[in-house]
Amino acid sequence: MDRVALITGASSAIGAAAARAFANAGYAVALASRRRSSLDALAESIASDGQRALAIETDVTNGASVEAMVNRTVEELGRLDVAFNNAGSGAPPTPLGDIAPEVFSQALGVNVTGTFLSMRAEIRAMLLHAGGAIVNMSSTAGLQGVAGLSPYCAGKHAIVGMSKAAALDYADKNIRVNVVAPGPIASERIDPEQRDRVGRFVPIKRIGTPDEVASLVRWLCSPESGYVTGSVIVIDGGRLAGTPSFAVAGNKP
């Protein structure tokens, strides 16, 4: 029987790249997103290459929708071995005092509640089939502050803490939980001029690609990473490595 991978936020960018990476590694893939037309196109493309793909329109903020996503994955593909919880949400940069409460709640609904609901359903399914691996999507904004991005930072920090706790909850049940924290990654929303401008501030002198993140996620779900759980893996071209730390009293910038 095929190994089965579930990817949320699979309709574009990192999610779509991860879906292809798992399919190329021999997994049957369940693709979840609110963007049904994009999911269908991706599923058809993966199927045309000879691998099983299932498109499931899903709202990760809705518990019933998430339960249906996992149930359908197991019913139609046979099991659930790995999951990449990539669905997320952001908003234009805004100082905290000017952020509407509903904007803050919406960001936490997708990033935090969506990840929680997804993990909760995925873990229950994995416990039925001898375990599995989960990777959750955070960001370097989940490891440091970013001006104007209070809701996004709050959500991505929460994902890190929640994932570490879940990793401890299920370490002895053969379910591993890890986090990826990308820096600037190319997408259809970033034009070439923006990529070049942002890339100048990255030590490696470019921004990352969705395929690079997808490769890391696939490795974290593979037997080669079998001793890795509760970890946060930064993939940012060296940006955080160049951030000074002043944790020792008396240090000055």
Image (tube, helix red, strand yellow):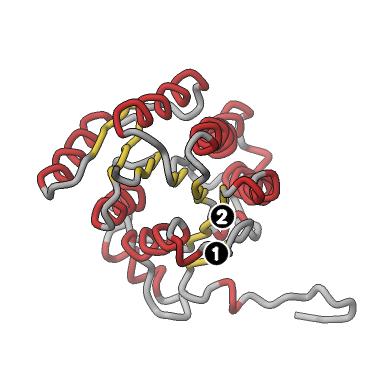
Q: Position of residue 178 (x, y in %)?
A: 56, 55
Marks 2 and 1, the one that precedes in the sequence: 2
The residue carrying mark 1 is 233
Question: With 144 as the anchor, is 217 left or right in this view?
Answer: left
Q: Is residue 250 visible?
A: yes
Left or right relative to 105: residue 202: left
Q: Nearer the viewer, residue 75 or 8?
A: 75
Element assignment for label 2: strand
The residue that appears at 47% across and 23% down in the rendered structure is 67
Check whether the beta carbons of the residues at disc 2 and disc 1 lie within 8 A of each other.
yes
Q: Residue at x 35, y 43 (%)?
A: 4
Q: Residue at x 26, y 51 (%)?
A: 23
The residue that disc 2 covers is 178
Number of numbered markers:
2
Instruction: Kindly identify the amino acid type of the residue bearing the numbered disc 2.
Output: Asn
Q: Quick check: can you spot residue 153? A: no
SS category of the residue bearing label 1: strand
Q: Is residue 235 left or right of residue 249?
A: left
| Quadrant of res 141 | bottom right
Q: Looking at the picture, how far across and down is residue 143, in whole percent? A: 64, 59
Q: Residue furthest left?
A: 48
Indicate the quadrant containing the N terminus: top left, top right, bottom left or bottom right: top left
Residue 133 in percent (x, y) is at: 50, 50
Q: Nearer the viewer, residue 225 or 105?
A: 225
Q: Quadrant of the C terminus?
A: bottom right
Amino acid bearing label 1: Ile
Above-or-below relation of 53 to 250 = above
| Residue occupying image coordinates x 38% and y 27% | 58
Image position, residue 242 (x, y; %): 59, 79
Mark 2 to mark 1 CA distance (whole Å)? 8 Å
**What numbered label is drawn on residue 168?**
none
